[in-house]
Image: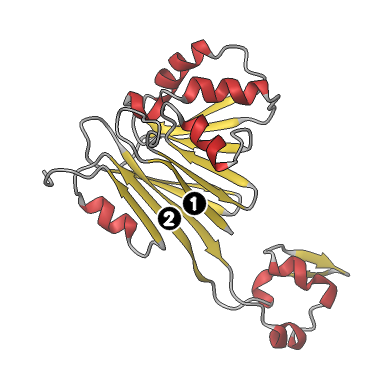
Amino acid sequence: MLDVSLLGTGGMMPLPYRWLTALMLRYNGKSILIDCGEGTQIALREKGWSPNPIDIICFTHYHADHISGLPGMLLTMGNAERREPLLLMGPKGLTRVAGALCTIAPELPFEVRYQEITEAEQTFSFDGFQIKAFKVSHSVVCYGYSMTVPRGGRFDKERALQLQVPMKLWSRLQKGETVEAEGVTYTPDMVLGAPRKGLKVTYCTDTRPVESIVTNGAESDLMILEGMYGESD
């Protein structure tokens, strides 16, 4: 299951009833946060979620209302004795900007890794899902994000029986594993049909209308556009 929560939808100034822009995605034990403005931790707590399991934080751009909550978030993770590495992803300059903010969150007990986006469109693959970043139009370099969860084909019992695939291997093959048993190699395509359409969520904020939003948002199951304004240049 893919959980999606808009933690905040406010612009520039957090209010008691409306936090700054942030989106949390949770899938198969992984948590991805897009933007981390002031008050994001409080919004998480109101949701009943903890910041500690966050695996990736993506930044659309480096205006303060989208990144100023990062040092506090890191400190909270550290105080919760997090040890797993945290990946930060964002436009070029991420290492410099986030590194400067991290000077007020020193001696973290976990590694902070950086992935800078350098192309107009870039896709990053993780265990069980993909994140695609695509450039949009703001007063500074800004990206939208699409998260896609591929979906395998349906299990074909008749084909599995016809190919004499041992029943004890069906579950592992259905999960996408290649299995060797008694000198024979069994692959997922032996028991699965054609891939089905997966889940896709697209998120954009603080951008003028541009073609990249249309092309990258195509076939999204959920598309969130926040802070649109003006005409396309």
Vertical order, 134 against 66 (above or below): below
- Upstream in sequence: badge 1 or badge 2: 1
Disc 1 is placed on an element classified as strand
User: How far apart in space, not on screen, are marks 1 and 2 (Cα)?
Assistant: 9 Å
Callout 1 amino acid: Val
Callout 2 amino acid: Val
For the C terminus, the image quarter is top left
Quick one: 201 or 24, which is closer to the camera? 24
Which residue: 56% across, 23% down?
A: 74
Task: Please state the horizontal and vertical placement of residue 41, each as a whole percent of the image.
Answer: 52, 30
What residue would you read off at disc 1? 4
Q: Which mark is residue 65?
A: none
Determine crowd level at label 2: few under 14, some 14-19, many 20+ residues with C-alpha closer than 10 A: many
The answer to whether 200 appears left or right of 150 in the picture is: left
Which residue: 21% across, 53% down?
A: 211
Viewer-nearest of labels 1 and 2? 1
Vertical order, 138 against 80 (above or below): below
Q: Which mark is residue 201?
A: 2
For the N terminus, the image quarter is bottom right
Task: Please state the horizontal and vertical placement of residue 199, each as a whole percent of the image.
Answer: 48, 62
Vertical order, 72 against 51 (above or below): above
State yes or no: discs 1 and 2 in contact (Cβ < 8 Å): yes
